[in-house]
Image: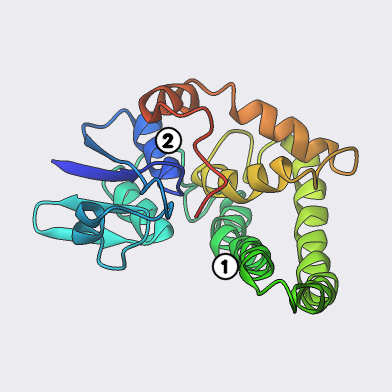
Amino acid sequence: MLSLHHLEYSQSYRVLWLLEELGTDYELKLYQRDKKTSLAPADYKAVSPLGTSPVITDGDLNLAETSAIFDYILDQHPDSPLRPAANSAARTDYLFWFHAAQGSFMPMLLMSIVFQTLEKRSPALIRPLIKAVLAKATSAMVEPRLKLLLDKAEADLAATGWFAGESITAADMMLSYPIESAHSKGLLKEKYPNCEAWVARIKQVPSYQSAKQKDGKPSAIFQL
């Protein structure tokens, strides 16, 4: 049986949501972060080939990386509408947004988190200088790229309220982590009403809610 090794407050929440939406049999193994470092515990790192989240096991298979895990699971459900057919009108939008989630959105959010960590951990004497340098890098690289992505998301959601066709797909699930993270940082407020409405919409999906119950945390996202 497929097992999801679910680290609290991590990207593996999206895989948990996918499994709930598909209604497939799986085993959920929960792991708590170290209270001092917020990092994954040793028993989780023993399972994850990269020491990162998410990771699944299925028999002898041990697989990391969110998009790879999504494709592996969806391959076992070829008739699922969560992945539009190759000849469907929604396929191109699906492919773009499914891969943009990890390939474009997440690097910008990760860079932002790294910058914040560097500033916080830099020696007090040079912290003002580090803060100024990182602020310039953020305004020059991170913010413009995020704006382009959110602008496109806002425009594409205007058609149906979903990213690929008339209903929810795995692309929406993949995008939940970065766009909800942007929402939590206040980046959507008043500027991106379609994105804000989409965030509210996915939270009403029954499988999202059941995944949140199994996760057992007030917020299942916004940490790496």
Task: Tell whether label 1 touches label 2 (CB within 8 Å).
Answer: no
* Residue position marked by numbered label 1 in the rendering: 103
The image position of residue 132, as x and y in percent, is 84, 75
Q: 143 or 202, which lies in front?
A: 143
* Left or right position of 130 against 10: right
Establish if 38 lies above or below 99: above
Which residue occupies the extreme right position in the image? 190
Which residue appears at 46% of the width and 47% of the height? 83
Asked if one can make out residue 163 in the rendered structure from this viewpoint, the answer is no
Which residue appears at 64% of the width and 34% of the height? 166
Q: Residue 17 carries which label?
A: 2
Which secondary structure lies at badge 2? Answer: helix
Which residue appears at 50% of the width and 47% of the height? 84
* Left or right position of 190 against 14: right
The image position of residue 127, as x and y in percent, is 75, 73
Q: 53 or 203, which lies in front?
A: 53
Determine the image quadrant of residue 97.
Answer: bottom right
Location of the N terminus (image quadrant): top left
Q: How many neighbours does mark 1 have within 10 angstroms: few (below 14), some (14-19), or many (20 or more)? A: few
Amino acid carrying label 1: it is Gly
Determine the image quadrant of residue 165.
Answer: top right
Which secondary structure lies at badge 1? Answer: helix
Amino acid carrying label 2: it is Trp
